[in-house]
Every structure is written in C-alpha cells, then in structure tokens.
Image (cartoon, grey):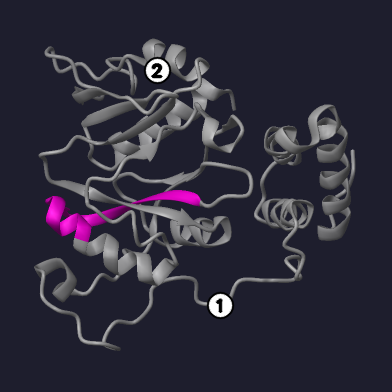
Amino acid sequence: MRAADHTRAMLAGFQAAGVDRVDLAVRSPEGLMLWQRNRPLSLDPGARMRAPGEDLPLAWLRAANVNCSEIYIRPARGFDWPLVFLDDVTVPVAMKVIHRHGGMAVMTSARGGCHLWLPCERLLDEEGRCRVQRWLAGQFGADPASISGEHLGRLAGFKNWKRCGCWVNVLGCCLGPGDARKSLEIPLATLDGREVPQGCCRPVGPAEPLSRNHSGHDTSPSGMDWAWACNMLEAGMDPEAVRQELVATARCRRGPDAERYARRTVEKAMVKVGLRLH
C-alpha cells in the first residue's frame, strides 16, 4: 500500500470503531506542538458520508512531516469513546490480539513495537480508558508510561523521524460492526474503578508462548534485524514490505550499503522460514 492508503486505513479503522472526531498534533523538530483539535472525521452537515480523512488537513500534515515533524492522532479529547490505546506492543502479540479480539495494529518502526487500538463494548470516559489501559498493559506487555487515557498515537502513512524516517504503517485492522471475534474480557472492577484483587483476572493475551526460534541471544542491531525479519515473514508480511522497512531502519548506520544489507537479510530470512525466493 502507498503511504496515503495506510492513512486512510487507519482513519477508516477509527470510524469503524465509532470514533467520529479526532485531535491531530504536529511536533516540530524543535519540540513545538501544533494542534488541530476536535476535527470531524467523516460526516458533513448534510449527513453525507465522506471518505475518512476528507475533512482533515492531511496536506498540512504531509508538508510538516516532509520537514521532519512527527505526526500524531487520537480520538478527540473530552468525549467518551469505545477505543483504548496501548504503546510498544510486540508485533507477534499485536497480531494475535487483533485476530482474536479485533483492533488495529500500527507498526511505528521496523524493530520497535506496535501501537495497538482496541475496541471496547461500552463507551469509556478518559478516566475509564486510563483504567482499562493500565490493566491491558499488564496483560500484553505494553508501555506502562502510555496509559493516560488521552495518549497520542502516531498517524499511519507518515514518517517516524525518531526512527531514522521509517514509515508508520497499519499492520492489521479488524474493526467494525458485526465482527465475530471474541471481546476482550476486561474485569468489571477495572471498568468501575474498583481495586482488582491480585490473581482474580484471567490473562486474555496469546494462549501460547511466543516462538523464540529466531531471537537467539544476539542483541546487536543486525541480530535484532534478523529476528524481526523472520517474525514478520512468519506473520505473513510481504517480503518487499519487510525489505523496505529494513532499508529505512538501517540507512542511518549502514549508509549506501543499506539496500544490499536489507535485501540479503530478507533473502536469508525467507530461506529460514521456508519461503520461496522469487
């Protein structure tokens, strides 16, 4: 998919989850935050459904991103929403979660984790979202520092300059009415704001431990690239997309050799996981 397609896919995911207003934020290279708050996502005054993002200043965001600004989004603050955010979830966990429970996984860097947007069965205010995020972060190994209930996530289809300008992409999206996936089992005590006794909550993450066949003990950048490439190919990611992500990540440290390095890494990973080279 092109960058614009990833943006539309993410906005369509928000819309399918019941979010119709969003906040946008641009962080300049100097650290200045510029906001577009409470922007309608898809519905015009005549009640005609528009394409997701048609009412958003996407051209302004793209121009800012070209000039090395970071681009963020969240459901508009001040409203109740049936969607919660988790940061830094590993790709294998994120993909298992959305295939089992629904949601949207947004990969923010080649070797980094995912932003995970998960649907809830009821509307939650900011405090409620914070409680649910705190509980879910423990289930899925997410960043415990990103559970404020109003946290910003990166908008797909834009570059992450914190990670050498790699693209932010939608890895998977399973959101919308009539989805037959099993809802997340969030304890009522968490939703109601009461203390959840230790040990009373059954984990709702992946039923089986994650495969570590390709992780080994190599924590060098090349070793981490190798493990990531193998995991992505096993998860069904297109080899060319894996190669492009590796090029973007490796360019900072390998310079002109990044293309060759990424191609060879993906080719060897394909052999390792049993995929045929074209």
Can you identify the residue that label 2 sits on? 61
Rendering coords of residue 10 (x, y %): 41, 34
Rendering coords of residue 105 (x, y %): 46, 47
Labels 2 and 1 touching (C-beta < 8 A):
no
Of marks 2 and 1, the one in the foreground: 2
Identify the image quadrant of the C terminus.
top right
* Mark 1 burial class by Cα count in 10 Å: few <14, some 14-19, many 20+: few
- Amino acid bearing label 2: Leu
Q: Is residue 111 above or below residue 239?
A: below
Q: Is residue 148 above or below residue 42?
A: below
SS at mark 1 in the image: loop
Q: Is residue 17 above or below residue 84?
A: above
- Amino acid bearing label 1: Glu
Can you identify the residue that label 1 sits on? 208
79 or 123, nearer to the observer: 79
The answer to whether residue 175 is magenta is: no
Rendering coords of residue 239 (x, y %): 75, 41
SS at mark 2 in the image: helix
Q: Main secondary structure of the magenta part?
A: strand
The answer to whether residue 115 is magenta is: yes
Q: Quadrant of residue 129?
A: bottom left
Instruction: Judge left or right: residue 147 versus residue 116.
Output: left
Which region is colored magenta? Answer: 114-130
Structural distance between the alpha carbons of marks 2 and 1: 40 Å
